[in-house]
Image (spheres, rainbow, N blue to C red):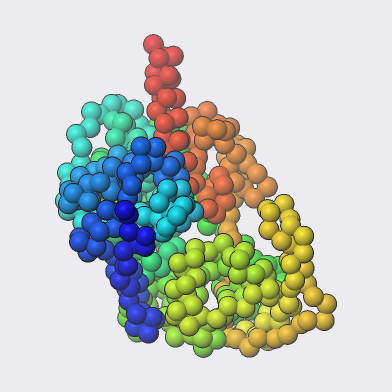
């Protein structure tokens, strides 16, 4: 009979980890991973695979771990996922593969995410597969999870793939948007190096619209994929948001990822240290921002207009934040940021939950006369972000009101030969959703280029 509970996984102690940016979760050792792998029922109809947006053959790679065939486990994962070290750390497995785990119907589900991470971390210098090249060229805009995934899939099909990245290094949100203690940069670099071995060329400091237009790329390449992400932060539109000491979560996390986080005396991109920080929002980006601020020495409070049950952040991340001494103030809405030139406090109003709205969540409503003030010297706004409007406005592609590109069921845009996936089409979502849609786009691009070749004959 399978063991009822998951094999425990070691973590840094909270009182130690708030002093550093090292990874919180320490991962499984080999024997621990094998012990957890033994819990897998090896179902004949594995629902966990259906729950994975990139359809990893989960029972197959777990069986290899159980048999101590760790290199084979990585190869099995990479049949459909070329970013296992990333996905094993940041994917919301509890809402995807693990939610579908048959064992989880009665006991704790198999810890699929941590096993994927183990397999990836164990991987040595595995040679890339032999690829039969063709003469077709594909341009990829953006080197985040969508761009990297589409590039890898097309490279494996023999295409000559070039990624154009606007920033000075590669990885997109993986490098700039997720803190080191959740996703170490060495993991991002390792996964990118593997994709380079597939023959993918990467060009940095390449701003599309300045270097080439989308239309020019369609003339130079057989197809174009856009995975430029969602880098435009949303604000609340309340008084005081222009005060010194107010950051968008995007800016805050990028600055921290650019600076030497483990050496507070050496900042490449400085952030003013604060003693009391208010973080507005309750998604993963909000929790990341709060935990970063805590590591920089602040007393941190997360304010959210709904209750804890409605928080969109991962349960694991909320648990870690609470262990690290971060406060949570639910049913609270900021209505004004106070101060003359710099932040001195936030005026808030208490909320109550009413009827369900169009999202299925109960609508928060202000309680009359419930205003109160929280003293603070820094505010981080983390209420979401959308696509940068530059690409939509400098091309003739059909786009939505928030500059998200409109795509069909095959991720094709309104321009012939141009496809898109990830946050630029959906708004801010998960890494794994971006990867799943990018794989769909890669399949469609392959079909498009092959058919275009037939039409030309």
Where residue 150 sits in the image (x, y, percent)? 39, 40
Where residue 162 sits in the image (x, y, percent)? 34, 40
156 vs 251: above or below? above
Where residue 68 sits in the image (x, y, percent)? 17, 52
- Tell me, yes or no, if residue 353 can be seen here: yes
Nearest the viewer among 379 and 27 is: 27
216 vs 183: above or below? above
Locate residue 280: give its quadrant. bottom right
2 vs 82: above or below? below
- Tell me, yes or no, if residue 195 can be seen here: no
Nearest the viewer among 203 and 337 is: 337
Where residue 233 sits in the image (x, y, percent)? 58, 62
Which residue appears at 51% of the width and 32% of the height?
Answer: 410
Nearest the viewer among 317 and 204 is: 317
* Residue furthest out toward the front: 1
Locate residue 296: give its quadrant. bottom left
Which residue appears at 32% of the width and 44% of the height?
Answer: 42
Which residue appears at 32% of the width and 54% of the height?
Answer: 2
Q: Quadrant of the C terminus?
A: top left
108 vs 145: above or below? below
Which residue appears at 31% of the width and 31% of the height?
Answer: 157
């Amino acid at each position: 009979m399978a063991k009822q509970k998951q094999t425990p996984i070691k973590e840094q102690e909270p009182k130690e980890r708030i002093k550093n940016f090292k990874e919180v979760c320490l991962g499984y050792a080999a024997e621990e991973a094998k012990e957890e792998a033994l819990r897998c029922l090896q179902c004949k109809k594995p629902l966990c695979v259906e729950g994975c947006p990139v359809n990893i053959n989960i029972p197959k790679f777990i069986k290899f771990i159980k048999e101590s065939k760790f290199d084979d486990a990585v190869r099995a994962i990479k049949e459909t996922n070329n970013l296992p070290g990333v996905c094993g750390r940041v994917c919301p497995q509890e809402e995807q593969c693990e939610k579908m785990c048959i064992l989880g119907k009665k006991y704790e589900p198999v810890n699929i995410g941590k096993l994927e991470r183990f397999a990836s971390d164990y991987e040595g210098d595995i040679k890339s597969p032999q690829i039969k090249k063709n003469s077709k060229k594909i341009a990829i805009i953006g080197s985040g999870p969508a761009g990297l995934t589409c590039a890898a899939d097309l490279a494996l099909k023999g295409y000559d793939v070039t990624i154009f990245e606007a920033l000075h290094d590669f990885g997109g949100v993986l490098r700039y948007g997720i803190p080191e203690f959740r996703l170490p940069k060495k993991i991002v670099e390792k996964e990118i190096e593997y994709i380079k071995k597939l023959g993918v060329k990467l060009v940095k400091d390449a701003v599309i619209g300045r270097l080439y237009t989308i239309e020019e790329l369609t003339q130079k390449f057989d197809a174009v994929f856009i995975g430029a992400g969602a880098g435009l932060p949303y604000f609340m539109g309340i008084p005081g948001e222009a005060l010194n000491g107010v950051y968008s979560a995007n800016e805050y996390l990028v600055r921290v990822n650019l600076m030497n986080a483990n050496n507070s005396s050496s900042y490449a991109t400085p952030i003013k240290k604060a003693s009391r920080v208010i973080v507005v929002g309750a998604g993963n980006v909000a929790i990341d921002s709060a935990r970063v601020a805590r590591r920089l020495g602040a007393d941190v409070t997360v304010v959210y207009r709904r209750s804890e049950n409605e928080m969109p952040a991962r349960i694991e991340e909320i648990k870690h934040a609470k262990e690290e001494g971060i406060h949570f103030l639910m049913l609270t809405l900021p209505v004004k940021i106070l101060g003359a030139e710099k932040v001195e406090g936030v005026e808030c109003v208490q909320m109550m939950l009413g009827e369900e709205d169009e999202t299925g969540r109960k609508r928060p409503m202000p309680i009359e006369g419930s205003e109160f003030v929280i003293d603070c010297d820094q505010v981080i706004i983390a209420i979401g972000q959308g696509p940068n409007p530059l690409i939509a406005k400098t091309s003739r592609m059909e786009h939505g009101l928030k500059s998200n590109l409109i795509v069909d069921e095959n991720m094709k845009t309104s321009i012939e030969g141009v496809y898109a996936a990830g946050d630029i089409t959906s708004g801010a979502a998960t890494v794994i959703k971006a990867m799943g849609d990018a794989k769909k786009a890669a399949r469609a691009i392959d079909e498009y280029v092959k058919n275009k070749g037939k039409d030309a004959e």
